[in-house]
Image (cartoon, coloured by chain):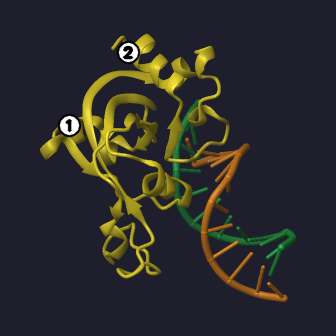
Chain colours: A yellow, B green, C orange
Amino acid sequence: MKYWLMKSEPADASIDDVLALPGQTIAWYGVRNYQARNFMRDAMHVGDGVLFYHSGCAEPGIAGLAEVASTSYPDETQFDAGSKYFDPKADRENPRWMLVDVRALKKTRLIGLPELRQQPLLEDMQVLRRGNRLSITPVTPAEWQYITHQLLGT
DNA sequence: GCCAACGTTGGC
DNA sequence: GCCAACGTTGGC
């Protein structure tokens, strides 16, 4: 059992949007970074815990809890010439971009960046590191425990 | 294999 | 809109 933080722009797919989908599940399309892809392809397992993070918005921070809901499979948008995620170098025999399904479990109160940065226990969290741009980062069990229990009271 | 140019992310 | 950080591309 591993834990992850996954960023989504709420204008694109917010925690509310995903909770409103059938099965509360979304294919995590659009990742075009090899490190993030490798996490989905090689390291994630069904049932892994996910912190659903809102980025690129007025109030960036953790907005909900989710879980990995599938093993990895090819991201269809790489083959779609009409998609902004189209990759001309990808082909079906040799897909370049993989994704997993993510199931939203619940919306939480928003834990913003300032609040996260204020916690000594979270000072090494990857998403808080200077210059971090990775849209998927591993979360340690201690960080997960602290966020879900101390900050969210679950 | 080096590295400059360029594009993107994402907080502020 | 700005800008720091960093990944990718492509010429050499």
Q: Would you say residue A59 is visible in this rendering?
A: no
Few, some or many C-alpha atoms within 10 Å of disc 1 (few <14, some 14-19, many ≥20)? Answer: many
| Disc number for residue A112 | none
Identified by mark 2, the residue type is: Leu
Q: How many marks?
A: 2
Of helix, strand and loop, which one carries label 2? loop
Which residue sits at x=47%, y=49%?
Answer: A43
Determine whether, in the image, residue C4 is placed left or right of residue A115. Answer: right
Q: Chain of mark 2?
A: A
**Residue at the left extreme, as displayed:** A22
- Given the current orientation, which residue lies at the most extreme front position? A1
Give the residue drawn at x 52%, y 39%: A138
| A29 lies left or right of A147 | left
Of residues A76 and A59, the one drawn nearer to the viewer in this rendering: A76
Mark 2 surroundings within 10 Å by alpha-carbon count, few (fewer than 14), some (14 through 19), many (20 or more): some
Q: Nearer the viewer, residue A68 or A104?
A: A68
Where residue A86 appears, as percent x and y from the top left, is: 39, 72
Q: Amino acid at mark 1?
A: Leu
At horizontal 45% and vertical 38% (from top left) the residue drawn is A4
- For label 2, the residue is A152
Which mark, by number, is residue A19? 1
- Quarter of image, res A41: bottom left
**Measured from the top left, where is residue A9 in percent x and y?**
39, 44
Q: CA distance from mark 1 to mark 2?
A: 18 Å
Report the front residue among A106 and A43: A43
Could you tell me which quadrant the N terminus of chain A lies in?
Answer: top left
Badge 1 and badge 2 in a common chain:
yes
